[in-house]
């Protein structure tokens, strides 16, 4: 079986392979790029692997006039620049020791050993320069084509090697699995058993996985499984996934937004729990405040985007369709400009009374549907 794609036939890609042609070094595409090309999904990252150690990869690449950067030499990874395009090449590896967070690895020349240490069968796929697929485990191609997500080997062992694989399971389920098959029963049992191991994973890594999961076209089935297995409570205490499916349905009329999905999930302290940035946390707080306001006022105070997303979140939580005329209300509020300033009232009010007078007039302006003019308010 072969894969195709512009990324595979690109001149810089083929030049990289030419640097190793005629040598005893094997070079393969690996993981996500092979999987996605096989199932006709977009290919974003192109990763490669080799049976040669980093020093041999470096020597051959430099001999071909290519620049090499030792980006992860202790893990067997170097980055080769071809006409400005970076390619990460990692030596085949086998796991020597794992502690649930970090791995001690040994370099290998055996592609089967390298495949056996990967997380999911659909990720343990390789391809040569011609796009011919290698499936060392014998199940990766079938699982990928069936959109069936399975751990490589024993799920308990795979999870104990790196507890972040629990969240990776749900992320990949959201992006690549066919929910009609149902989840792998052994995988879910192992996940439930190992869920408390997530306590040893940094919140930055947890947050990164959750962002990517929530950005999937439809994360609702994966989030429901997370909740049923106890993982959702582990990573985001107080969260509830049941309204996300409603939100995804409502999103047919709007642009999906992972932060809106997080607002619907809820949770006690999503900022520190997922290590949100200041910008992300501010937007989430604005959205939650806007959910208590009429759409037009929300747009006036927080802008059209926050107003629109907060209405999506609110209606999803209530299990109701979007109101008729919502976009017109948002547009009206977003375009409204309060026609007076503090200076206009400074002769009549001072100190706290000035602020109170402005707030009262702004409330009248909003209540009028933004119809009152400067003269009315003064």
Image (tube, rainbow, N blue to C red):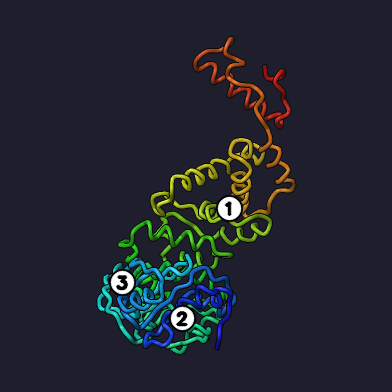
Front of the two marks 1 and 3? 3
Does residue 194 appear to the left or right of 212 in the view shown? left
Position of the N terminus by quadrant: bottom right
Of marks 2 and 1, which one's residue comes earlier in the chain?
Answer: 2
Depth check, mark 3 against mark 2: the one in front is: 2
What residue is disc 2 on? 18
Position in image of residue 229 (x %, y %):
43, 68
Disc 1 element? helix
- For label 3, the crowd category at 10 Å Cα-Cα, with few meaning under 14, some 14 to 19 and many 20 or more, is some
**Image quadrant for the C terminus?**
top right
Give how far apart the Cα atoms at labels 2 and 1 are: 56 Å
**What numbered label is drawn on residue 75?**
3
Q: Nearer the viewer, residue 6 or 169?
A: 6
Of tags 2 and 1, the one toward the viewer is: 2
Q: Residue at x 44, y 67 (%)?
A: 86
Q: Secondary structure at mark 3?
A: helix
Specify whether 44 is left or right of 364. Answer: left
Q: Establish if 114 lies above or below 74.
A: below
Instruction: Indicate which disc, 3 or 2, sits on the residue closer to the N terminus.
Output: 2
- Report the residue at 39% width, 74% height from top: 89
Where is mark 1, residue-wise? 317
Q: Is residue 92 above or below residue 312?
A: below
Horizontally, residue 344 falls left or right of residue 12, namely right
Residue drawn 40% across the image and 85% down it: 26
């Amino acid at each position: 079986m072969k894969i195709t794609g512009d990324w595979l036939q690109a001149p810089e890609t083929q030049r990289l392979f030419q640097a190793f042609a005629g040598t005893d070094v094997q070079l393969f595409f690996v993981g996500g790029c092979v999987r996605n090309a096989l199932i006709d999904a977009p290919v974003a990252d192109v990763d490669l692997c080799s049976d040669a150690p980093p020093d041999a990869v470096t020597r051959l690449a430099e001999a071909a006039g290519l620049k090499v950067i030792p980006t992860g030499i202790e893990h067997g990874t170097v980055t080769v620049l071809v006409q400005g395009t970076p390619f990460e090449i990692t030596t085949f590896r086998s796991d020597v020791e794992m502690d649930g967070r970090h791995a001690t690895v040994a370099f290998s020349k055996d592609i089967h050993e390298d495949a056996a240490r990967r997380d999911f069968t659909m990720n343990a796929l390789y391809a040569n320069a011609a796009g011919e697929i290698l499936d060392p485990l014998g199940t990766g191609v079938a699982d990928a084509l069936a959109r069936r997500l399975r751990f490589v080997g024993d799920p308990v062992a795979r999870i104990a090697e790196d507890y972040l694989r629990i969240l990776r399971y749900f992320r990949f389920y959201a992006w690549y699995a066919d929910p009609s098959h149902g989840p792998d029963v052994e995988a879910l049992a192992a996940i439930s058993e190992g869920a408390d191991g997530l306590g040893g994973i940094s919140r930055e890594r947890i947050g990164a996985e959750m962002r990517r999961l929530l950005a999937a076209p439809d994360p609702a089935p994966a989030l429901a499984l997370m909740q049923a297995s106890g993982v959702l409570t582990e990573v985001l205490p107080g969260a509830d996934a049941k309204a996300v499916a409603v939100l995804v349905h409502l999103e047919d009329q709007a642009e999906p937004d992972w932060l809106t999905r997080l607002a619907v999930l809820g949770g006690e302290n999503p900022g520190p729990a997922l290590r949100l940035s200041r910008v992300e946390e501010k937007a989430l707080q604005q959205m939650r405040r806007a959910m208590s306001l009429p759409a037009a006022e929300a747009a006036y105070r927080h802008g059209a985007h926050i107003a629109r997303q907060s209405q999506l979140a609110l209606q999803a939580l209530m299990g109701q369709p979007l109101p008729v005329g919502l976009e017109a209300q948002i547009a009206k509020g977003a375009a409204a400009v309060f026609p007076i300033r503090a200076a206009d009232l400074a002769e009549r009010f001072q100190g706290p009374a000035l602020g109170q007078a402005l707030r009262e007039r702004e409330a009248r302006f909003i209540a009028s549907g933004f119809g009152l003019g400067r003269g009315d308010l003064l």
